[in-house]
Structure formats: C-alpha cells, structure tokens
Image (cartoon, rainbow, N blue to C red):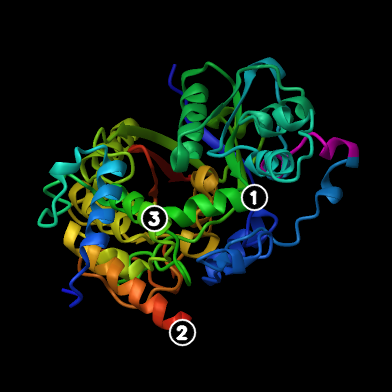
C-alpha cells in the first residue's frame, strides 16, 4: 500500500504571528520579526536581538493549574495542534492516529529556572520539572487532550528535528501504518543558560539574519511551533476536506564529517533521496525553502549542495530571515511556509538581503515575495551533528 | 601580522592553554605551529579562544578571533588585547 498523503490543516505559533494566517501574511510581505530580546535582558548577551513569540498569553489557552505541567515549548505545540485540527475538520480514529513531534531542547527553560533556583538561590527543584522538561511533553500533551492512543513519540535531531518528525509521520500515513498523523515541532529556547551557550559558539549575528548575503554575520535565534494534520488524499477527498498541499517525499542522510561544520555531500544525498522518494526529477522542483541559517559556513555550503543536486537551481529562499532559527521547530515553521508558497502561489522572500555573495550563487528571492505558482517544492533542514532531512511537497491538484 | 612581539610569559601561557584544551603534549605546541598543523579546526579554535578569555580575563571579539589561526597569532592577539585593556584601565 502506498497512499498519497494530504495536508488538511496547519497551525502556527510564531514570532511573525500567533496563527497560520498572520504568519503567512508577514512572510509574504517580507516582514522580519527580529527585534531586541525581552525574555532575557539583552545587556547580558553579546547579541541583543532575537525572534521572540510576542503577545502569546498562556492563560488564554490553558487552565492555570494545567500550566504547572506545560512548558512554553509544549504550549506552542498544543496551541498549533488545536488550530491545525480545527482547520482540518478531521475526526481522528484514536488508535489509528500518530503524533510525532520534533524538538531540540524540550523544556530547557524550565530546567534552567529550576537548576538556577537550586545552585544559585539555594532553593528547591519543583517536582514538576521532569514532566515539563521531557522532550516528549508536547506530543504527550496533544495525545492527552485529543485522546490519541496510536503511536506517539518525539524526535530530537537538533535543527532537523521537525523535518525528521514530519518525514516519519508522512511515511507512516503513506504506508498505511496509521490513517492520520499530527506532526510538526516546537521550541522555546530563550533561557539565559541556553542563550549563553549559543553566544559561546559565536554563530549568532550581532544585528540581524541575512541569509546568502555577502555581509551575513550569523543566525538569529527564534522560537515557536507548527503542526500539520496528515491523512490519505483519498480520505480527505471523501470527506470533502480542503487539501492545502501534499507531502510527496522525504530524504535523509548523515554527513559523518564533523560535529558542527557542514558538508556538501550529505545535503546533496538528502535532497536526492527526497526527490527519489517523491519520484520526481530536479527539473520539476520550482522552489526550495533553504536551511539558510545566515552563518558564513552554512549558506555557502548549502548553495554549493543545491547547485550540485540541481543542474539549474530553482528559486531558493530562507524564511529564517524573518522568523529566526527556531532550532527543533525550524522544519515545522518552514513546512508551513513551503505549504503557504504552494497554496497561495507566492514564494516568500529572503529578507534583510543586501548584496550577493559569489559563494552563494543562487536566485534567493531577495527581499520581495514573488508571485509564481510552482508544482513541487523542497524544504531543507540540516543539523549540528551532520544530520540532514529534506521534505518534498506538491501543490494540491 | 599584528605587530606586537609577545612576551615569553604570554607565549608560554598561550601554549599551555592550547595544549590543555587540545589534549596535546606541551612540547608539540610551539610558537611556529599553525592551527592546521596541530589539527585544530574552527570549533576547536572557538574552544581555545574561550579558554584564553578565562586565562587572561579578556573579552576576545569575533574579528580578533578570526585572525587567531596559529600559536603565534594567538599570542600576538592576546598581547595586543592586554595592552588595550591596560590602556583603557588607566
């Protein structure tokens, strides 16, 4: 059995907006959400800016007692899952539905607060620390609220987490292991300890994120969550659901090269694997949502990989220029962006672009969205640790 | 490159930090070695700069860090930043 897999709902909590519509609206207008950070005092950091989710009021979404158990990263996933389910209108068969989420750091803001309380303030550690911190807290929270009793698990592969999660969910629906999947990812990385760890790596930009620009200075950290509802295309048609797009392929690879330096060969193999899985040729792809972090190393290496995998490279943009690098949620937010591109016939731009870098010889859709209806699109995620995961999407017929 | 001849005391401290960070025998890390010769990659380099900041109580900015690609450049860079720090303190 190899079924076509439809996306029938998308939910988003992001720095660009607190639902899919506002997220897409900002993306298509090319408006970055990169500002001076507020959650952590910017004066304590070498870099003052971040892409924070603003205006998200947990009490508007959860009972106050419930919030004791739900870290910000799990709140994002739950709220996005509710939006995606409502948009889809699906009635889940609980045993035949999977939930697969991605996160890199899980509830590490809870961990940071509690460990600070113990080490520095000579206080105590809350008994709810463990259930808030665990990486699967988001998937389990969705399972509890929706009553889903099928396969539920979480994948943590740093910045590829969500693409690995979505790819696995896609394969499970395609092969008939389940009849629906709730999948995506979330991240809430703004704690002092975690931001200091990024500072020490010297990969965060002191101003903004300029993917593929000659004067790029690094990434900008982001946060948020996005969730997709997947079901067989036939089932979606049978119940008259709106099909936003299809997932048609998933490819992954490991560089086996270096713990942080990117390689060209690994991403090339992952993109080729996604195309092969989708049974499409490189010429059919009309858009690539790049990993495009804005670091010197990633962007030139990714550009070389794209040029190697595609004889004539299609337009490529990095929406991280607007929503920041949401780490384990990056693939989920970028899946939502790619689905938006296919659904609305608009390629979101690479914002903050200043001047071309000969080492990134691509059409990066600089600064202005482009109206063009493409048939197939890829979304790349490449992680520290050399783990690459690429999704292939098709516009709804 | 940076025009400051580092003192022997600074050189020996820089060599010790590099050797300790990279788990190399002290005698292998000499003033004339490049990081490439010592198989020190960019992530190792960031880790060395972090250790040098602690050793010398300095803040090494990104642009200074990018020039530190050899033992000599590390020692020269530290010397220069120490002189700057001293001047700023006066």
Which residue was labeled with disc 1? A12
User: Could you say whether the residue bearing mark 1 is in a helix, strand or loop?
Assistant: strand
Q: Are marks 2 and 1 on the same chain?
A: no
Q: Position of residue A268 (x, y in %)?
A: 24, 42
| Residue occupying the point 45% across, 43% down | A159
Q: Report if residue A71 lies within the magenta region.
A: yes
- Residue A17 in the figure: left or right of residue A264: right
User: Could you say whether the residue bearing mark 3 is in a helix, strand or loop?
Assistant: helix
Residue stretch rendered in magenta on the structure: A65-74
Which residue was labeled with disc 2? B90
Viewer-nearest of discs 2 and 3: 2
- The secondary structure making up most of the magenta span is helix
Do the CB atoms of the residues marked 1 and 3 lie less than 8 Å apart?
A: no
- Residue A391 in the figure: left or right of residue A58: left
Q: Position of residue B6 (x, y in %)?
A: 21, 68
Do the CB atoms of the residues marked 2 and 3 lie less than 8 Å apart?
A: no
In the rendered image of this protein, does residue A150 appear above or below residue A270? above
* Chain of the residue that carries numbered disc 2 in the rendered image: B
* Chain of the residue that carries numbered disc 3 in the rendered image: B
Q: Are marks 1 and 3 on the same chain?
A: no
Which residue was labeled with disc 3? B55
The disc, 2 or 3, on the residue closer to the chain's N-terminal end is: 3
Give the spatial CA distance, label 2 vs label 3.
22 Å
Give the spatial CA distance, label 2 vs label 1.
54 Å
* Chain of the residue that carries numbered disc 1 in the rendered image: A
């Amino acid at each position: 059995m190899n079924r076509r897999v439809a996306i029938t709902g998308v939910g988003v909590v992001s720095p660009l907006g607190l639902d899919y519509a506002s997220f897409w609206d900002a993306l298509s207008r090319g408006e970055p959400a990169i500002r001076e950070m507020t959650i952590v005092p910017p004066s304590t950091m070498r870099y003052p800016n971040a892409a924070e989710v603003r205006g998200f009021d947990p009490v508007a979404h959860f009972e106050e007692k419930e919030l004791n158990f739900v870290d910000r990263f799990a709140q994002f996933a739950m709220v996005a899952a509710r939006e995606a389910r409502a948009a889809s209108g699906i009635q889940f068969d609980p045993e035949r539905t999977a939930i697969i989420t991605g996160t890199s750091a899980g509830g590490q803001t809870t961990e940071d607060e509690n460990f600070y309380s113990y080490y520095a303030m000579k206080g105590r550690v809350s008994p709810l620390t463990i259930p808030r911190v665990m990486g699967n807290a988001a998937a389990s929270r969705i399972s509890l609220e929706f009553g889903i009793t099928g396969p539920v698990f979480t994948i943590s592969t740093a910045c590829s987490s969500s693409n690995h999660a979505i790819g696995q969910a896609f394969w499970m629906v395609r092969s008939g292991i389940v009849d629906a999947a709730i999948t995506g990812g979330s991240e809430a990385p703004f704690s002092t300890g975690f931001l200091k760890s990024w500072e020490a790596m010297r990969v965060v930009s002191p101003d903004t994120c300029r993917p593929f620009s000659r004067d790029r200075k690094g990434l900008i950290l982001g946060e948020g969550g996005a969730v997709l509802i997947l079901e067989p295309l036939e089932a979606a048609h049978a119940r008259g659901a709106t099909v936003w797009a299809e997932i048609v392929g998933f490819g992954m690879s490991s560089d086996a090269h270096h713990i942080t330096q990117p390689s060209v060969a690994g991403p090339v193999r992952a993109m080729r694997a996604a195309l092969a899985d989708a049974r499409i040729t490189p010429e059919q792809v009309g858009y690539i949502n790049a990993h495009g972090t804005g670091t010197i190393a990633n962007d030139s290496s990714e550009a070389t990989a794209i040029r190697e995998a595609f004889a004539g490279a299609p337009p490529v943009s990095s929406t991280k220029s607007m929503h920041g690098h949401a780490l384990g949620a990056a693939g989920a937010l970028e899946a939502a962006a790619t689905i938006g591109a296919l659904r609305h016939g608009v390629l979101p731009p690479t914002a903050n672009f200043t001047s071309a870098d000969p080492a990134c010889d691509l059409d990066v859709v600089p600064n202005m969205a482009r109206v063009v209806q493409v048939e197939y699109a890829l979304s790349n995620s490449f992680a520290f640790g050399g783990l690459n995961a690429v999704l292939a999407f098709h516009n709804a017929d | 490159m940076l025009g400051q001849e580092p003192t022997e005391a600074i050189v020996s401290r820089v060599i010790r930090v590099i050797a300790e960070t990279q788990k190399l025998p002290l005698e292998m890390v000499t003033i004339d070695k490049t990081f490439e010769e010592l198989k020190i990659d960019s992530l190792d380099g960031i880790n060395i700069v972090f250790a040098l900041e602690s050793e010398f109580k300095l803040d090494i900015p990104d642009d200074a860090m990018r020039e530190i690609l050899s033992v000599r450049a590390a020692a020269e860079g530290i010397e220069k930043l120490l002189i700057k720090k001293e001047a700023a303190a006066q």
